[in-house]
Amino acid sequence: MTDTLLRPRRSVLYMPGANERALEKAKGIDADALILDLEDAVAPDAKVEARERVCAAVRSGEYGHRELAIRVNGIGTQWHDDDLAAAAQAGPDAVLVPKVNSAEEVHALVAALERHGPPAHTQLWAMIETPIAILHAEQIATAHERLTVFVMGTNDLVNDSHALHVPGRAPLVPSLTWALLAVRAAGKVVLDGVFNDVKNAEGFEAEARQGREMGFDGKTLVHPSQVEPANAAFGPSEQDVEDARGLIAAFEEAQAEGKGVATFKGKMVESLHVRDAQRILAFHEALQQR
C-alpha cells in the first residue's frame, strides 16, 4: 500500500479559518486530519484575513501528526485564484476544492496549483457534492495522480437532489455507493460526509458505523465531540487486530502443511481475506507510528 492510502483519516475535522481560537484549539484535538476552511465557515468580508491566518497556521508546524488540508473557495468565485496561490505557497498536505464536477476541472486545478510551486507533498483533494459529479465520478477519480482524496459533500448533494436528511440516509446511499466504487477503482481515498446534529451522539455513531460498513476510509466532522467516536468507528479495534493476526497465521499454517483450505474461527479463509487482514495490520501499524 502507498503512504497516501495508509495514512489514517478516520476523523477529518473542519475548522473555521477565520476563528483564531479554533485554529489554536485544533492543535490539541486528536483528529487524524484538519480541514482549515476558507469557504462555508468564513463570511465574505473575512475571506482575505482568514486566508492569511490559515496559511500562517500551516507554516507554523505546530499541528503534530495531524494532516492539514486547506479548503479554498470554489472555482469561479472571486477568491478562488488567490486562495489557490496562497495555499500552494503555504505547502499544506492538501488543497481541498469544493464542487469539482469533471476531469477537465481536475486538470485545470492541477495546472493552476503547480504554477504556484507547491511542494511535492501537497496533494489535491476534491469534494464530490453535486449530481453531475456523481455521474462523472470515475472520470474525476482517474483524472490525475495528484488528486488523491475525495470528500463527499452530503449536505449539498441532498439539497441538489431535492432529497431529505433522514436516519439511514436512504436517499443518498446510491450516490455514496457509486462514488465509492469509482474511487476504489482508481485506487484512491474517499471520506464520508458530515453529520449535522452535533448533539445527537447516537445518531452520529450510527452514521459513522454505516460509513465504515460501506467502505469509507473516514468521516468529515463539524465538531470536536465527533472525533473520538469517528476514530473508534473507522479504526481497527484490539479484537480486529488480534483476529487479523490469527487469520494470517492460520492461512500460512495451512499452506505450510499443503492443505488446500484454511479455516479460522470456523470460517473458510481465502487469499482475499488474508489481503484484508494485512490491510488492517498495516493500518494499525500506521496508527502506532504517528
Image (cartoon, rainbow, N blue to C red):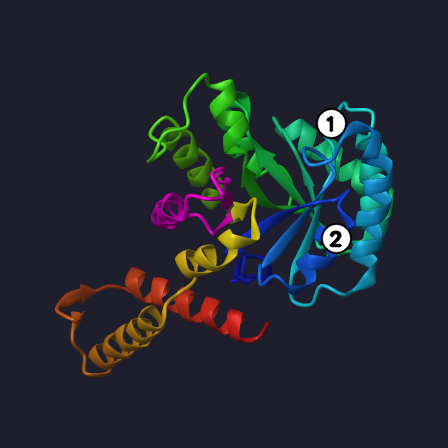
Q: Secondary structure at mark 2?
A: helix
Q: Nearer the viewer, mark 2 or mark 1?
A: 2
Q: Residues within 10 Å of mark 1 (few under 14, many from 20)?
A: some
Tell me if residue 210 is in the magenta stretch: yes
- Residue type marked 2: Arg
Instruction: Check residue 21 in the rendering and tell me which mark sits there, or answer none.
Output: 2
Q: Residue furthest left?
A: 266
- Across and down, in percent, residue 279 comes to 42, 64
Describe residue 94's horizontal placement relative to residue 179 as left or right. right
Quarter assignment of residue 43: top right
Q: Residue at x 69, y 62 (%)?
A: 27
The answer to whether one can see residue 136 in this image is: no
The magenta stretch is 191-219
- Across and down, in percent, residue 82 comes to 86, 35
Are dots 2 and 1 in contact, CB under 8 Å?
A: no
Q: Residue at x 36, y 50 (%)?
A: 209
Q: Secondary structure at mark 1?
A: loop
Residue behind mark 1:
75
The relative height of residue 158 versus residue 289 in the rendered view (above or below) is: above
Describe residue 196's horizontal placement relative to residue 143 as left or right. left
Foreground residue among 102 and 208: 208
- Across and down, in percent, residue 8 comes to 54, 61
Quarter assignment of residue 50: top right
The answer to whether one can see residue 259 in this image is: yes
- Across and down, in percent, residue 45 comes to 83, 29
Quarter assignment of residue 246: bottom left
Q: Residue at x 32, y 67 (%)?
A: 274
Tell me if residue 156 is in the magenta stretch: no
Q: How many marks?
A: 2
- Residue type marked 1: Ile
What's the CA distance linking mark 2 and mark 1? 28 Å
Badge 2 or badge 1: first in the primary sequence: 2
